[in-house]
Image: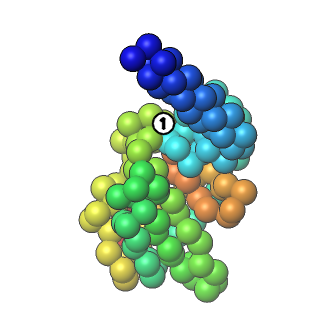
Amino acid sequence: MKKSITIIVVVAILALAVYAVLRTAGLDDSSVENGGLNQNAPVNSIEVRGVVTVVDLEQAMFDGPYVIMVRGSDGVEEIIAVPSMGIMLCAARDAIVDVSTIKEGMTVEARGSMTSRGDIVPCESSSHYLRIIQ
């Protein structure tokens, strides 16, 4: 019985260690993608305005972001990724519209930080936002 408990404790410690290493390794993007956990870091903001072409809520079912693709007046498509899991830690949570109300064809505008993948995350600063224009 004592061997079983010891094995369980060792496995739990190893699992926590692996989690900590993986979490630390991705801090460059994860602080933005997981809801702006590092709110004291300097923030470079980008603004986008366009017509919604895709609203993908599926990733949020697995703690991923809500994904909104917009096409600007110049024809360039941008992805706005709104954290689902870390939204309560988001510095701009009061300035982010309920994503479930956004539909294809609507015009939205957002200000947020750009991740290394090119997604715009409106969460790192209290000056960030996501709002419906039409």
- Classify residue 31 by image quadrant: top right
| Number of residue marks | 1
The residue lying toward the viewer, choosing from 52 and 18, is 18
- Classify residue 62 by image quadrant: bottom left
Seen as rendered, the residue at the extreme top is 2
- Residue 89, placed above or below residue 131: above
The residue lying toward the viewer, choosing from 60 and 114, is 60
| Spot occupied by residue 63 in the image (x, y as percentages of width and height) | 42, 51
Q: Residue at x 46, y 57 (%)?
A: 65
Q: Residue at x 63, y 81 (%)?
A: 76
Residue 125 visible? The answer is no
Q: In the rendered view of the protein, which quadrant contains the N terminus? A: top left
Seen as rendered, the residue at the extreme left is 101
How crowded pointer 1 is (Cα within 10 Å; few <14, some 14-19, many 20+) is rated as many
Secondary structure under the numbered disc 1 in the rendered image: loop
Q: Residue at x 44, y 18 (%)?
A: 5
The residue identified by callout 1 is: 91
**Position of residue 94 in the picture relative to residue 126 (left or right):** left
In the rendered structure, which amino acid carries the disc numbered 1?
A: Ala
Q: In the rendered view of the protein, which quadrant contains the C terminus? A: bottom left
**Position of residue 44 in the picture relative to residue 68 (left or right):** right
| Spot occupied by residue 43 in the image (x, y as percentages of width and height) | 67, 41
User: How has the structure been colored for display?
Assistant: rainbow
- Residue 117, placed above or below residue 12: below
| Spot occupied by residue 33 in the image (x, y as percentages of width and height) | 56, 49
Residue 69 visible? The answer is yes
The residue lying toward the viewer, choosing from 10 and 87, is 10
Q: Residue at x 56, y 68 (%)?
A: 79
